[in-house]
Amino acid sequence: MINYPYLRLLKAYYDSKSKEPLKIEGESILRFRAGIFDIDPYMEINNGRYHTLGDIGRFNHGFRTGFYKKSRKHNLIFTLAGATAKYRHRIPFWKKFEMTTKLVFTDDRWVYY
């Protein structure tokens, strides 16, 4: 079984190259379809996959704003320290959906999406 959707991450990376760059406070939008590796026994996206797709959204925002490239240049790790998910809608198998990502706050050590 595929645990991490590397193909989706690569697609987000290559798609970000052809899209307009974002300002750091901009909002990125990704479109997905709930696939077979995303669902649980209830035939909808499972909790872990919500967080994983959030990772891809975070990376996509970093790709489009140039934040990812800068972090790698300065040897900073673009990693996640904590996560909270708010489940607003159930996403059943094979349904298309959009995910938006934006930076909401920064302090001297962290960036919050």
Image (cartoon, rainbow, N blue to C red):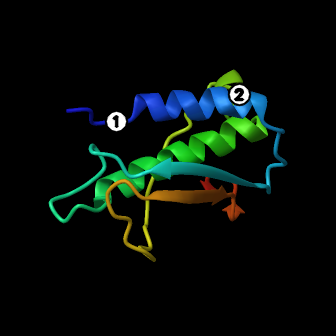
Q: Can the viewer see residue 1?
A: yes
Where is residue 85 shown, x and y percent of the image?
A: 43, 67
User: Residue 20, located in which quarter of the rendered image?
Assistant: top right
Q: In this view, does 28 lie above or below 20?
A: below
Residue for badge 2 = 69
Q: Position of residue 44 (x, y in %)?
A: 29, 62
Q: Quick check: 69 left or right of 95?
A: right
* Residue 87 percent coordinates (x, y): 41, 73
Observer-nearest of 43 and 25 = 43
Please state, as top left, top right, bottom left or bottom right, where the C terminus lies in the image. bottom right
Front-most of residues 30 and 53: 30
Could you say which quadrant of the image residue 5 lies in? top left
Total count of labels: 2
- Count residues near mark 1 (Cα–Cα under 10 Å), then give few for <14, some for 14-19, many for 20+: few
Q: Who's the residue at 57% across and 58% down the image?
A: 98
Q: Which residue is identified by label 1? A: 4
Give whichever of discs 2 and 1 has the lower sequence position: 1
Q: Residue at x 56, y 37 (%)?
A: 78
The amino acid sitting under disc 2 is: Lys
Front label number (2 vs 1): 1
Tell me the element at label 2: helix
